[in-house]
Image (cartoon, helix red, strand yellow):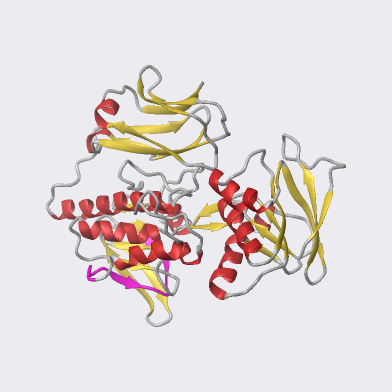
Amino acid sequence: MLVIGGGPAGLGAAISAKENGLSRILVVERDLELGGILNQCVHNGFGLHYFGEELTGPEYAGRMTGRLEGSGIEILCDTMVLSIHPGQDVHRVCLMSACSGYRCLDTETIVLAMGCRERTRGAIGIPGTRAAGILTAGTAQRYVNMEGYMVGKRVIVLGSGDIGLIMARRMTLEGAKVLACVEIMPFSGGLARNIVQCLDDYGIPLLLSHTITEIGGRSRVERVTVQQVDASLQPVEGTERYFDVDTVLLSVGLIPENELTREAGIAMDPRTGGPLVFENKETSIRGIFACGNVLQVHDLVDYVTEESEEAGKAAAAYVLGKATAAFAPPADRIIDVTPGKGIACVIPQKIRLDRLEEKIRFFFRVSEPSKTPKRVMLGDGERVAASFRRPWMAPGEMEHIKVDRSTLQEMQGEILLLTIED
């Protein structure tokens, strides 16, 4: 098995595959060390669900890499995967590294765990000068937490994603003045706990339904213009506010890194930006699995680990079953899981009824916040497979439900619709 990515998803998949009987596993990581984004997340809040205690990002990464010791899992760091060429029996993966140069490896199964990247100023097109001092929140986080550089003294944050919220607090703790966090939507894109702990606790205002419409400055950012937006997200004339800042941090969305996935011809889901997967995280190409932020952007690394363990287990079963000729008959019935009213996206998008385990977990995000109790319904249009009450929901919070296999097998038709009802 070859795992692309040595972050929490890749490590979880590799460890799980090993524990489920696979002997030859290689993890390929483009950075110099394992751990991925966890290495720069020095704040706490990781591991509450998975380890049952509160850890920092490096501590969480240390727990995962510690489990590799003595496992026999091979690691290749500072190595970039250039392409994937799917085959009938084996898949070919081409790599490049400074020490070994260009080479290709054949593998029976691949786990995609490349994570995600941040949207930049160019992706959202903010007008103004191209002055220094405009960074994504994740880049600033790496500079401050890993490289030891302070990136600014008077800061404004655009977007209220979790990284932006956490960096607003981090910059404050480092001595900077954070003037505001500006969010174009009428609701925050971050976790509720981060809004409280990172903004409210430090008196940083959150300006909802506002955006930055101009960045000014010569060699360095000097001033930004912030305007209110209307229901169609267009700036409202006469609402201009000016902030004298030297730094703009962008937290305007994460994009799953799926260039390799698309080039390999794997079917994609435009809602999540990741590949379409079956109930065991297998993609549309047999033997290639996906997990972590390359599949869907997660709130909590704990869920990344759980998801990657499912992918690693399934990948091991694929290889071992193939070896004994016990794996393979085509699924007798495939059902599409479709987001309906109030649902932005759902994972998995397809389930094979004859391959379900005792319970299956569906992850989803709602399309708009609901502050009153709502009911999550999963059904085929005539019958309800599952119904769950939620006191409140927000797009920034990933939700999940578990459904019994026996219930799903009773469903009729080829579509399961997930909806939010009053």
Q: Residue at x 65, y 53 (%)?
A: 202
What's the magenta bit mostly, secondary-structure-wise?
strand
The verdict on residue 71 being magenta is yes
**Left or right, 226 with reference to 391:** right
Give the image location of residue 146, x and y in percent.
53, 72
**Left or right, 160 with reference to 315:** right
Q: Residue at x 44, y 32 (%)?
A: 338
The verdict on residue 291 being magenta is no
Q: Residue at x 62, y 63 (%)?
A: 173
Of the pair 167 and 285, the residue shown nearer to us: 167
The answer to whether residue 77 shows anywhere in this view is yes
The residue range painted magenta reads 70-85
Seen from this angle, which residue lies furthest right?
238
Give the image location of residue 419, x and y in percent.
47, 27
In terms of image quadrants, where is residue 383? Answer: top left
The answer to whether residue 86 shows anywhere in this view is no
Seen from this angle, which residue lies furthest left?
324
